[in-house]
Image (cartoon, grey):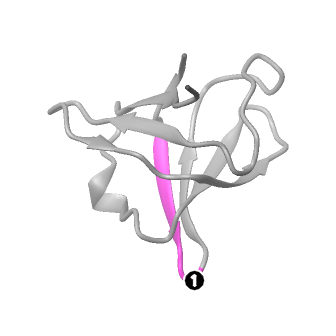
C-alpha cells in the first residue's frame, strides 16, 4: 500500500532518520514496528522498520538508524510492506 512521497529527511544521531510527508495523520495506517519499503527515484529499494511516528500533521516517521539521509532522496516513495 502506497503511503507517501518523501518531502524532507532529517537525521537524528543515535535515533535514526525522520521521513516527512504531506500526508495528514489518520489517512494512513502505519504503526511502530511495521516494515516499510522505500523506493528511491532511481529504483533502489530500502526496507527499514518504523521506529517512531510524530503525531503531527502532516505525519513524520522515524526509521532504523542504519538508513542514512543520503540513502533517501526527496521524492522517494514510501510503501507499507505488510504481507
In the figure, is residue 26 to the left or right of 43? right
Q: Residue furthest left?
A: 42
* The magenta stretch spans residue 9: yes
Q: Residue furthest front?
A: 83
Against 60, residue 12 (above or below) is below
Residue name at image x 69 percent, y 51 percent = 33
Against 33, residue 77 (above or below) is above
In the picture of the structure, the residue carrying the numbered disc 1 is 14
Q: Position of residue 78 (x, y in %)?
A: 47, 31
Res. 62 image quadrant = bottom right
Pick the residue in front: 44 or 4: 44
Residue name at image x 57 percent, y 42 percent = 20
Q: Position of residue 11 (x, y in %)?
A: 49, 67
Which element is circle 1 on?
loop
Residue name at image x 49 percent, y 27 percent = 79
How busy is the neighbourhood of tag 1: few (under 14 within 10 Å), some, or many (20 plus)?
Answer: few
Res. 26 image quadrant = top right
Range of residues picked out in magenta: 8-14
Q: Position of residue 59 (x, y in %)?
A: 71, 36
Residue name at image x 46 percent, y 35 percent = 6
Res. 39 image quadrant = top left
In the figure, is residue 29 to the left or right of 34? right
* The magenta stretch spans residue 77: no
Amino acid at each position: 500500500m502506497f503511503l507517501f512521497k518523501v518531502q524532507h529527511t532529517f537525521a537524528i544521531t543515535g535515533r535514526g532518520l525522520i521521513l516527512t510527508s504531506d500526508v495528514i495523520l489518520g489517512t494512513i495506517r502505519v504503526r511502530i514496528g511495521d516494515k516499510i519499503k522505500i523506493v528511491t527515484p532511481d529504483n533502489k529499494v530500502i526496507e527499514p522498520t518504523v521506529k517512531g511516528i510524530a503525531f503531527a500533521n502532516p505525519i513524520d516517521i522515524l526509521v532504523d538508524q542504519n538508513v542514512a539521509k543520503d540513502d533517501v532522496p526527496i521524492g522517494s516513495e514510501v510503501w507499507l510492506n505488510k504481507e
